[in-house]
Amino acid sequence: MPEVVVSDMHHRITGVSATIRALLPFMQERYELVLLSNFPAEGIRRITLVELWKLLRQAPSERPFYIWHARRNNELFWALFTRDVLRLPVRVVFTSAAIRRHSWYPRQLIKAVDAVIATSHAAAALVPHVRAVVPHGVDVTRFSSAKPLVNSPWRDFRCVVGIVGRVRPEKGTDLFVQALCELLPAHKDVCALVVGKTTSKFQRFADELKAKLAAKGVMDQVFFLDEVAYTDMPSIYQAMDIVCAPARYEGFGLVPIEAMCSGTAVVGARTGAYPDMIQQGENGFLFDVGDQAMLTHYLAQLLDDDQLLARQKSKGQAMVDAQFSIAREWEGIANVYETLWAENPHE
């Protein structure tokens, strides 16, 4: 019998999915799990919603109730439906990363949960029922020990810069491409990776970005990789020397710490938890949201100063290990679970 239900109810693997799947091996060491998702995870029992309801009709064997950990609105809806309409022995934990006020519908859902885990103090100030502030973490070993993909078309360039995230304005892909248009003509030994899916909604946006690069004569230095499998991402990060994170908004944002685990320098916007991750001039650079000129300036500094780049690349991994490891995140989450069970031992 499970103790914890983990849900990842999205039609594709997203950044949220990546945070969930990074935690699963750690969770499995301590608790019996089931995964409610369209996508499998190695070694974890995956079930459908109907199968889950049938399973939860049985009383927990060792716990007063099951814990359902949700991270999206649809997951919250079904978790609360299970608890309040079907009246099954479930308590609902929600992770909140947003650093802007939730709209009306999610606010109503969040009001009804049993415990909220916020990923930052800024996120905690915007929601009720906060039991703990637990930053997301990454598996340092997974990213630091990966090997770059062999026979990649970018292997012969002196320096590789990149951006990771869906191709759309919110992620600042256009800011990154404009910086490339200004820098790559004078840096023929540098190439760029654009790593992220382009959905049909933003296909025109992506086509316009490619047209800009072509007009500058640098398309042969830029590789659009579309969606990369979760298992391959550490190898992609290992190929890069500099990762840019110019998002116009992030709730938290894993890209900088994933990149630093892999030994890159990072140039990021002041959004999400990026200011907590990037120590200015030490392991990267921060610029104001939307400031493409400063993004270009900092990239140019790193491309033109090998010693500066090497120094920043060497600094990030130790910081991530100390502050943003997956083990630290998991301990914070497990403490919330145990507190909930201890508060209601006879339900």
Image (cartoon, grey):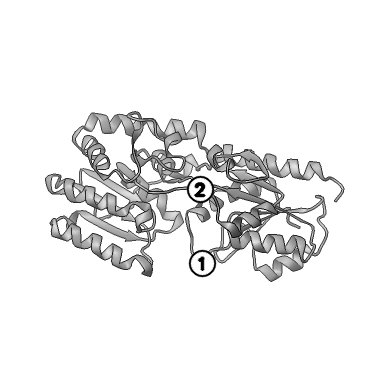
For the point 31% across and 54% down, the residue is 173
Q: Residue at image x 81%, y 62%?
A: 58
Q: Amino acid at mark 1?
A: His
Relative height, residue 188 to residue 108 (above, below): above
User: Which residue type does callout 2 highlight?
Assistant: Arg
Viewer-side residue, 282 vs 276: 276
Asked whether the beta carbons under mark 2 and mark 1 sit within 8 Å of each other, the answer is: no
- Quarter that holds the N terminus: bottom right
Residue at image position (52%, 56%) is 17
Please rate how many residues cluster around mark 2, counting C-alpha atoms within 10 Å: few if below 14, some from 14 to 19, many from 20. few
Helix, strand or loop at label 1? It is: loop
Whether residue 214 is visible to the viewer of this picture, yes or no, is yes
Residue 110: % across, % down = 64, 53
Instruction: Answer with the quarter of the image where residue 167 lies.
Output: bottom left
Horizontal side, residue 79 vs residue 276: left or right: right
Which element is circle 2 on? Answer: loop
Residue 88 picture location, percent across and down = 79, 61
- Distance (Cα) linking label 2 and label 1: 24 Å
Of labels 2 and 1, earlier in sequence is: 1
Q: Which mark is residue 88?
A: none
Residue at image point 59% right, 54% down: 71
Q: Viewer-proximal residue, 315 or 170?
A: 170
What residue is shown with label 2?
100
Q: Looking at the image, which is closer to me, 150 or 293?
A: 293
User: Going by the image, does 343 lie left or right of 81?
Assistant: right
Q: Residue tagged by mark 1?
A: 11
100 vs 140: above or below: below
